[in-house]
Image (cartoon, rainbow, N blue to C red):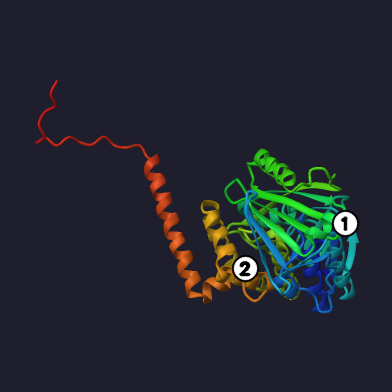
């Protein structure tokens, strides 16, 4: 009998396992792949990610970013620079494996090559109502007092909980080895390109002798997203270099009313649909939600009845919604503005010092999108004004699409002449 079983050993799962183990619980961490394993991800570590790492964690940085080039589908490029580091770049296999090592040092036990088929909270495999049965693909059953689902965006545990989504995006990425002369040109600088489809963008993240190049847009635009990546790579002069890895990944954002728990099972990270909707930044959301999930799972494991377990699960949901949920709400508003007016945001971040300062403060971890809107009156009023303009534009479009009723002729009007 384990106190806490964590399914998935990515940043969210490893953070949950670490947090629960630090609380003194018996923790089992299950991962279906062998570690280290590749993950489609830009690998940008911003301030909130750094601050959520375990004590003593040394980031395996491949580069330190001091400059950002912004462009709009290859045009109007401008580079902004900072004397202080904006954020760091890592390779996910190294980063994830190191997080797992910290969880193991804290006392968690790791099993890899283990696929989870389902979880059961009632039935023959469950000895009492304080138990969750984790049924593995090979038929083995693992028993726990609490389960944390951190098994990615196609989560089986998320399906058990009933996670609901309201935004799904497709990310395509290539890891492109480049010669030293090309690598030197990109060192310390990233590119963010506002893309041709509404809400889309591309990126170039340098990592030594390899460039991580990717694009993301709403799902359903697969062919257009693929063309965007091909054009993006060609425009950068990188079409002649063979990618070491080409991959794709769906990112999913939860709806506001989506559950985060069911009985003694809670979800975090991608499994819970926790992702910043505008930038689709997920590492910091995984680390922060994973830590909270581990802490509250430790409490759920100690609950002696369903009422107490439910209370602790609701406390976890409140912690997520009041923090990460608030950031997601602002991110949704920013995505709506960006999808309609990318030129406005491009002009602001490249031409206005306050906007650039907001960008640097967020990447360094001095604040968040939600924090800016909450504390900065000018930013809040600007976003509210854009919200009103967006609502007015949508209302106008709706009126244009509605069938027009024929105007009733006033009986006092002169009769129509033949």
Residue closest to the eye, 131 or 6: 6
Where does residue 358 sit, x and y in percent of width and height? 59, 71
Residue drawn at 62 percent across, 68 percent down: 359
21 is higher (above) or lower (below) than 185: below
Marks 1/2: CA–CA distance: 30 Å
**Hey, which residue is sitting farthest top in the picture?**
418
Indicate the secondary structure of the residue bearing disc 2.
helix
Whether residue 107 is visible to the viewer of this picture, yes or no, is yes
Q: Hey, which quadrant is residue 107 in on the image?
A: bottom right
Q: Hey, which quadrant is residue 2 in on the image?
A: bottom right
Give the mark nearer the N terminus: 1 vs 2.
1
Where does residue 242 sit, x and y in percent of width and height? 85, 44
Pointer 2 residue = 359
Given this view, does label 1 or label 2 mark the residue nearer the observer?
A: 1
Disc 1 to disc 2: CB gap under 8 Å:
no
Residue 396's tag is: none
**Quadrant showing the C terminus:** top left
Residue closest to the eye, 356 or 118: 356
Pointer 1 residue = 180
Where does residue 316 sit, x and y in percent of width and height? 66, 71
Residue drawn at 26 percent across, 34 percent down: 406
Residue drawn at 48 percent across, 74 percent down: 377
127 is higher (above) or lower (below) than 212: below
Query: Counting other residues with Cα less than 10 Å from the Cα at mark 1, is it few (<14), some (14-19), or many (20 or more)?
Result: few
Indicate the secondary structure of the residue bearing disc 1.
helix
Residue closest to the eye, 303 or 51: 51
């Amino acid at each position: 009998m384990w106190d806490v079983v964590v399914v998935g050993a990515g940043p969210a799962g490893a953070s949950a396992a670490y947090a629960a183990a630090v609380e003194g619980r018996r923790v089992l961490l299950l991962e279906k792949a062998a570690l280290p394993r590749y993950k489609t991800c830009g690998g940008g570590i911003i301030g909130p990610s750094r601050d959520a790492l375990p004590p003593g964690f040394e980031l395996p940085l491949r580069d330190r970013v001091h400059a950002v080039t912004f462009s709009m589908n290859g045009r109007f490029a401008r580079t902004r620079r900072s004397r202080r580091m904006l954020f760091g770049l890592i390779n996910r296999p190294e980063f994830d494996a190191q997080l797992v090592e910290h969880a193991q040092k804290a006392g968690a036990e790791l099993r890899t090559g283990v696929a989870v088929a389902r979880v059961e909270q009632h039935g023959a495999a469950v000895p009492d109502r304080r138990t969750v049965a984790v049924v593995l693909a090979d038929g083995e059953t693992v028993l726990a007092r609490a389960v944390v689902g951190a098994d990615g965006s196609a989560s089986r545990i998320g399906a058990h909980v009933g996670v609901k989504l309201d935004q799904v995006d497709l990310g395509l990425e290539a890891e492109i080895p480049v010669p030293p002369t090309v690598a030197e040109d990109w060192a310390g600088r990233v590119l963010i390109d506002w893309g041709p489809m509404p809400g889309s963008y591309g990126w170039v993240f340098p990592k030594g002798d390899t460039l991580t190049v990717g694009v993301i847009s709403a799902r359903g635009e697969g062919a257009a997203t693929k063309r965007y990546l091909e054009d993006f790579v060609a425009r950068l002069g990188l079409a002649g270099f063979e990618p070491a890895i080409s991959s794709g990944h769906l990112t999913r954002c939860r709806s506001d009313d989506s559950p985060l728990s069911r009985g003694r099972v809670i979800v975090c990270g991608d499994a819970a649909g926790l992702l910043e909707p505008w930038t689709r930044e997920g590492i910091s959301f995984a680390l922060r939600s994973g830590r909270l999930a581990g802490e509250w799972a430790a409490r759920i494991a100690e609950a002696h009845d369903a009422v107490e377990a439910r209370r602790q699960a609701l406390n976890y949901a409140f912690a997520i919604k009041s923090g990460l949920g608030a950031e997601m709400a602002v991110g949704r508003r920013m995505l709506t503005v960006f999808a309609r007016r990318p030129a406005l945001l491009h002009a602001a971040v490249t031409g206005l010092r306050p906007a650039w300062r907001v960008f640097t403060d967020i990447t360094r971890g001095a604040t968040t999108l939600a924090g800016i809107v909450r504390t900065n009156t000018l930013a809040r009023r600007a976003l509210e004004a854009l919200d009103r303009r967006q609502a007015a534009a949508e209302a106008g479009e709706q009126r244009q699409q509605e069938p027009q009723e024929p105007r009733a002729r006033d009986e006092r009007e002169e009769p129509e002449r033949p």
